Image (cartoon, coloured by chain):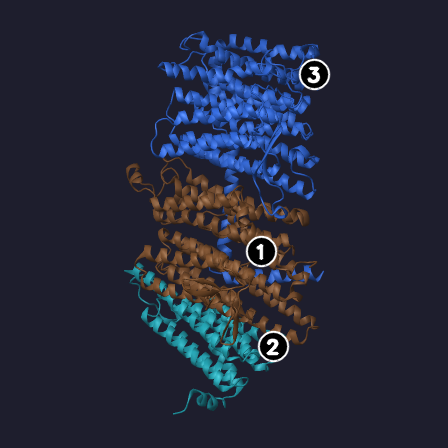
């Protein structure tokens, strides 16, 4: 066994296997997941009992394949050979470089961990949801590994469909409305990416990421697409906050689309194609604040998962847009976001009902990485953010600190809330659950401890940066301590403030307006195609002939 | 016994103007009148007058074929209309039919007469401004009259039978022009077949409409 | 020796007679019709044109011309691919019609239509094609009426529109004969162009001649509607291409393609707006396909091989999208006698396959990736973005409009099941009235075909290339 650190790619590269000439394609982990999805659905048809085991095997195999992939980065694979090329442009292909690899690995680890939880504690999710979740994971991974923008558009189209199906499979009284909103808003994201491809073609630029130079107008569209996919405020309405009652079941529903959005931001950072202007940092900051407020005012801290995901997602985008953070650091921060929240919400708290303090260690590691403590994966991006923010207008710094105070406070609150559910019963279930926690928590430390070019040396941080790094930690802790006195007042405001901030009222107004426009169109159709259709036809024909005569006569 | 061709040749003494006026009158009646019996009878007259007018520009035998085809179409339509009870008045179940002038108002006869007159005026001015090539002026008048009135009849129709009669009128008007320029027997035969198929299609649709009316009244 | 042309015309006619006699036995007639259409389609695609081969003890020569009543019936390379496509689509629709209640005479009339349409494609000169198309339109009007008592408005409008195209083509045929003698007469050439454009505008249901599509979609059995919108319409497209190819002086005129593009733009725009305004999945189908026709015309109007390929891709993908949507509408009408959004409120929970078919069919028709409709739409947008960016934006807007219409329908379908709906059954009765398994299988199979076509368009690359290369009427060629 040999251990060797590589300079290329920029992320960790450790060879732990004997030299081999077998090359792993980025398609393999995706195929593992798709095969698992197919087997699960077929198994559901014949009422097989061990569907969760199939999930574990599929996600485990995919994770292992992705780990092995690191030796051959950047790795490419043509998936769909679209011909003729003169008609379709580019093929659908995958390319895993260092940034994409880190995103993909984090996502797969999350999936593997969630599968282990499902194996240990099956729960009430319908069998169809398992297969759909695997398929959604596969397509999410494909979008991360997409080699060109056309492939990204295809993958996002499939992700939209699978996300909705997964949501519907979970059921619930509002799943239909959420699925429809998701189709609409995420569909817009897909359409935006598609428009970008068109504009790229128009300028005769290459659509492949590693060859792409994005013009300024196109960057705005890309930013919009990523914002829609991630669910930046106020485009967050599609996120199904109703599923928080079973966070361990709904983690992937929140994270797969959001990770796809974050991965796009990271891609833009890699190619120096981030959109310019102040609107993006403002949006990101507002998202972080709203996420923080919403997370903090929840009466049950276990229901703060979607808001923490929103808030920290905003912080990551803020990091990308104002700090000009290297893409790898952004990827590390995203991995920290993903793994930290996963382990926090599948893990146990320190208080009674938690099963003892060893069970709370993974959740504590999750909080640590999200809070950006040293020796965790989250330290890289958080430190880089405050280093960059110190050079920006002061109000960004201040509001970012406030947002982080609320977010860290909510994290600590979750960690210190008594559990209502008991540990899984039985040794095997214990073992599976423990494995799930270790799988999600260990990379948070390992990926940072083992030397990586993305690490930011502590001595390079300015004093302001250290203050920015430290004040939210202290503030969050103080907030938790004083929470009990404020809680009764907050509980009164939870419903009202929640509704106002979530903008349900705005989207209802928007949908009603759309319905009104549709009714107007329907009235027009009834007039033109009703009993007088032929007369209208001749009238319109006359107008068309007149127009043709004028336009062609010129 | 005289053949149809002989009859048409003898009828060719009818002045062109008379035939033209007759065509205009029949076409106008097709719009103004909603009664199915009258419509089918008027259609028969229209085909005969069209055949008469065509004898001025094509061989009488071919004009005879067209008139015969028209007559067969009218037979089909007559049988269909009779089978379905000549359509129904726009009255409620058990309602007594009102006086004839009130019924005419209900059926929109004044509007239809106005529409027919407008159609005739349009056809007249179009025939003067856009004379069709290779055909005499009276055929141009006939073609435009039937074409325009047929379109109006389709636009104002509420049932398949009336709409179909309008469509057949348009085709007849077109054939008045086209027969003058294309006299291939194959084309004549095909056009006859097309007309007949249209009549069968209209017959089918009329029967389907009537079945629904019977079901709703029973 | 049997001429292939003859087989393509006579065999469907014979099969039509047999299926008419056996029309009470739905399964037998459906499978017979699908088998005959499929076999003829496969034969048209794979049997060689340049030599005779032995089939079932008989010599069959696909490319052998036939003379009938002084008229030539000739099958060339592009025509045979077009006919193969038409027959295969018809075969697929016959199979769907097995379970989707398309009307009592669907199979017999469909086969007779195939016979007439084959004759229209292969007959020379074009004049006779227009006559055959009109006769076919009569049969198609009866087919779309579908034996539904009282539902005649759509069928009548369809018959009128298709018949009104006949005079235009006959006049064009006569003018062409004159033009051959006077090729320098510019006015004559313009009149021919006007006549042909008018005729094809009527047949292709360009705005404002589209007034039959909505009523037909609303009143007719869905599979019958799709049959007319795809099989009949595809033949018209191939005839248009044949005309452009045959009359080089016509296709050399830029204003022909400019007119086609403008009409296409108008049609696509109206289709997109009306699809957005739909309150009925039948309207989503009708106006979505109208928008699709318009986008294909806009692509053809670029007068380039890529434009032709884009138009053909759209024509290829359209039957799949429409078939999926039609199956959903058929299931919806089976349950509620309607496909209106309000009547289907909340039914997605008890009828998931119906909902999937309606939603996926609608999005596929809109051109959303990675469904079948994306192929043509992507090719069109890609081409127009480099040549006419404003048109590309219009096409994207049309995509959005149709998708929005389908999305609004989805909103109703996914309403919470416990909300009161006019046609809601009690939960126990809803559970009992499940979706038929064979329909589910047909929906699944059609979805699979759509997904395969959307993700692996290479399966049609070879015939597409063959068709595009057989036409040379592009600018600069």
Q: Quadrant of residue A226?
A: top right
Give yes or no for contact between labels 3 and 2 (Cβ–Cβ under 8 Å). Answer: no
Question: Quick check: can you spot residue B95?
Answer: yes
Task: Report whether mark 3 lies on the same chain as mark 2.
Answer: no
Of the chain colours in the picture, the one used for chain B is cyan
* Image quarter in which the C terminus of chain A is found: bottom right
The residue where tag 3 is placed is: A390
Dot 1: chain letter: C
Labelled disc at residue C466: 1
Labelled disc at residue B132: 2
Q: CA distance from mark 1 to mark 3?
A: 64 Å
Q: Position of residue A449 (x, y in %)?
A: 59, 12
Classify 10 Å Cα crowding around label 1: few (below 14), some (14-19), many (20 and above).
few
Dot 2: chain letter: B
Classify 10 Å Cα crowding around label 3: few (below 14), some (14-19), many (20 and above).
some
Of the chain colours in the picture, the one used for chain C is brown
Of the chain colours in the picture, the one used for chain A is blue
Element class at badge 1: helix
Element class at badge 2: loop
Looking at the picture, does residue A123 appear above or below residue C228?
Answer: above
Q: Quadrant of residue C345?
A: top left
Q: CA distance from mark 1 to mark 2?
A: 43 Å
């Amino acid at each position: 066994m040999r251990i060797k650190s590589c300079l290329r790619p920029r992320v960790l590269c450790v060879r732990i296997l004997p030299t081999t000439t077998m090359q792993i394609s980025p398609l393999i982990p995706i195929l593992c997941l798709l095969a698992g999805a197919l087997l699960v659905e077929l198994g559901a048809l014949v009422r097989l009992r061990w569907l969760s085991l199939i999930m574990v095997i599929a996600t485990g195999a995919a994770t292992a394949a992705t780990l092995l992939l690191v030796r051959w980065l950047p790795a490419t694979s043509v998936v769909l050979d679209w011909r003729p090329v003169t008609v379709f442009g580019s093929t659908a292909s995958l390319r895993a470089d260092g940034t994409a690899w880190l995103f993909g690995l984090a996502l797969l680890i999350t999936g593997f961990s969630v599968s282990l939880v499902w194996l240990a504690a099956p729960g009430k999710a319908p069998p169809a949801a398992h297969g759909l979740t695997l398929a959604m994971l596969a397509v999410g991974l494909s979008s991360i590994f997409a080699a060109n923008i056309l492939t990204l558009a295809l993958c996002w189209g499939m992700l939209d469909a699978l996300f909705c199906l997964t949501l519907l499979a979970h059921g619930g009284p509002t799943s239909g409305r959420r699925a429809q909103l998701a189709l609409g808003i995420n569909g817009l994201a897909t359409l935006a990416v598609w428009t970008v491809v068109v504009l790229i073609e128009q300028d005769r630029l290459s659509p492949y990421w590693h060859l792409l130079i994005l013009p300024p107008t196109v960057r705005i569209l890309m930013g919009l697409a990523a914002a829609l996919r991630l669910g930046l405020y106020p485009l967050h309405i599609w996120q199904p906050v109703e599923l928080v009652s079973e966070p361990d079941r709904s983690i992937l529903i929140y994270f797969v689309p959001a990770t796809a959005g974050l991965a796009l931001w990271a891609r833009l950072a890699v190619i120096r194609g981030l959109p310019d202007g102040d609107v993006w940092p403002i949006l990101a900051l507002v998202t972080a604040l709203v996420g923080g407020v919403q997370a903090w005012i929840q009466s049950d801290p276990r229901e703060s998962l979607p808001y923490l995901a929103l808030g920290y997602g905003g912080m990551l985008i803020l990091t990308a847009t104002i700090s000009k953070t290297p893409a790898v650091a952004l990827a590390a921060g995203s991995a920290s976001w993903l793994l930290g929240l996963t382990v926090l919400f599948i893990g146990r708290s320190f208080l009674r009902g938690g099963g003892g303090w060893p069970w709370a260690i993974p959740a504590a590691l999750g909080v640590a990485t999200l809070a950006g403590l040293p020796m965790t994966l989250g330290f890289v991006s958080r430190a880089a953010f405050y280093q960059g923010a110190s050079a920006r207008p002061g109000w960004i710094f201040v509001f970012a600190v406030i947002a982080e105070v609320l977010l860290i406070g909510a994290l600590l609150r979750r960690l210190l809330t008594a559990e209502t559910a008991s540990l899984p019963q039985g040794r095997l279930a214990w073992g599976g659950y423990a494995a799930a926690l270790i799988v999600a928590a260990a990379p948070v430390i390992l990926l940072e401890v083992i030397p990586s070019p993305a690490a930011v040396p502590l001595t390079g941080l300015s004093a302001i940066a250290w203050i920015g790094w430290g004040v939210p930690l202290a503030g969050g802790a103080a907030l938790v301590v004083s929470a009990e006195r404020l809680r009764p007042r907050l509980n009164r405001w939870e419903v009202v403030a929640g509704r106002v901030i979530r903008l349900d009222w705005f989207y209802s107004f928007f949908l009603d307006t759309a319905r009104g426009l549709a009714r107007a169109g329907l009235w027009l159709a009834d007039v033109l195609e009703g009993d007088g259709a032929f007369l209208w036809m001749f009238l319109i024909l006359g107008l068309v002939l007149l127009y043709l005569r004028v336009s062609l006569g010129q | 016994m005289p053949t149809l061709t002989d009859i048409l040749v003898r009828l060719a003494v009818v002045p062109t103007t008379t035939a033209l006026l007759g065509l205009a009158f029949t076409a106008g009646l097709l719009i103004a009148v909603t009664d199915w019996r009258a419509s089918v009878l008027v259609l028969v007259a229209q085909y005969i007058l069209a055949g008469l007018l065509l004898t001025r520009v094509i061989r009488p035998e071919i004009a005879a074929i067209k008139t015969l085809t028209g007559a067969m179409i009218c037979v089909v339509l007559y049988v269909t209309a009779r089978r379905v009870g000549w359509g129904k008045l726009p009255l409620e179940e058990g309602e007594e039919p009102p006086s004839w002038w009130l019924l005419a108002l209900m059926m929109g006869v004044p509007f239809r007469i106005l529409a027919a007159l407008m159609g005739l005026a349009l056809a007249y001015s179009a025939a003067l401004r856009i004379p069709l090539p290779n055909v005499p002026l009276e055929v141009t008048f006939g073609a435009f009259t039937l074409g325009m009135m047929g379109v109006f009849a389709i636009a104002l129709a509420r049932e398949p039978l009336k709409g179909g009669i309008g469509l057949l009128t348009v085709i007849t008007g077109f054939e008045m022009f086209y027969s003058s320029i294309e006299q291939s027997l194959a084309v004549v035969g095909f056009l006859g077949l097309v007309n007949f198929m249209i009549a069968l299609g209209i017959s089918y649709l009329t029967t389907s409409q009537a079945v629904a009316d019977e079901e709703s009244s029973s | 020796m049997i001429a292939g042309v003859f087989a393509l015309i006579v065999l469907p006619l014979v099969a039509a007679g047999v299926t008419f006699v056996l029309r009470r036995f739905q399964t037998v007639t459906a499978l017979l019709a699908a088998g005959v259409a499929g076999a003829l389609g496969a034969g048209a695609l794979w049997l060689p044109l340049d030599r005779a081969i032995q089939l079932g003890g008989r010599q069959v020569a696909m490319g052998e011309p036939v003379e009938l009543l002084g008229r030539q019936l000739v099958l060339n390379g592009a025509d045979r691919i077009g006919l193969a496509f038409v027959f295969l689509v018809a075969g697929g629709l016959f199979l769907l019609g097995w379970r989707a209640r398309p009307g009592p005479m669907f199979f017999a009339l469909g086969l007779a239509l195939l016979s007439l349409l084959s004759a229209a494609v292969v007959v020379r000169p074009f004049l006779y094609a227009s006559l055959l198309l009109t006769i076919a339109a009569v049969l198609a009007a009866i087919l779309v009426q579908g034996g539904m008592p009282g539902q005649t408005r759509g069928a009548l409008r369809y018959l009128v529109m298709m018949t009104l195209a006949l005079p235009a083509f006959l006049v064009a045929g006569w003018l062409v004969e004159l033009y051959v003698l006077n090729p320098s007469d510019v006015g004559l050439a313009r009149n021919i162009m006007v006549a042909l454009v008018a005729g094809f505008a009527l047949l292709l249901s360009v705005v404002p001649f589209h007034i039959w599509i909505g009523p037909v979609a609303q009143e007719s059995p869905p599979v019958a509607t799709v049959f007319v919108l795809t099989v009949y319409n595809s033949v018209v497209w191939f005839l248009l291409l044949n005309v452009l190819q045959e009359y080089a002086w016509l296709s050399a005129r830029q204003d022909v393609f400019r007119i086609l593009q403008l009409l296409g733009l108008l049609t696509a725009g109206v289709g997109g707006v009306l699809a957005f305004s739909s309150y009925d999945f039948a309207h989503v189908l009708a106006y979505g396909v109208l928008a699709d026709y318009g986008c294909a015309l806009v692509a053809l109007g670029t007068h380039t091989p890529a434009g032709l390929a884009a138009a053909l891709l759209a024509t290829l993908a359209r039957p799949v999208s429409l078939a999926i949507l039609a199956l959903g509408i058929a299931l919806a009408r089976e349950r509620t006698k309607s496909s209106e959004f309000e009547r289907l409120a909340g039914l997605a929970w008890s009828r998931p396959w119906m909902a999937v078919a309606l939603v996926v069919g609608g999005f596929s028709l809109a051109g959303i990736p990675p469904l079948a409709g994306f192929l043509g739409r992507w090719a069109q947008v890609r081409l127009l973005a480099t040549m006419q960016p404003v048109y590309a934006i219009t096409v994207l807007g049309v995509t959005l409009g149709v998708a929005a219409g389908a999305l609004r329908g989805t909103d109703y379908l996914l309403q919470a099941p416990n909300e009161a709906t006019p046609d809601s059954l009690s939960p126990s009765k809803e559970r009992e009235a499940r979706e038929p398994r064979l329909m589910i299988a047909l929906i699944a199979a059609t979805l699979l075909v759509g997904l395969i076509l959307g993700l692996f368009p290479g399966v049609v690359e070879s015939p597409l290339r063959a068709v595009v290369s057989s036409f040379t009427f592009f600018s600069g060629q």
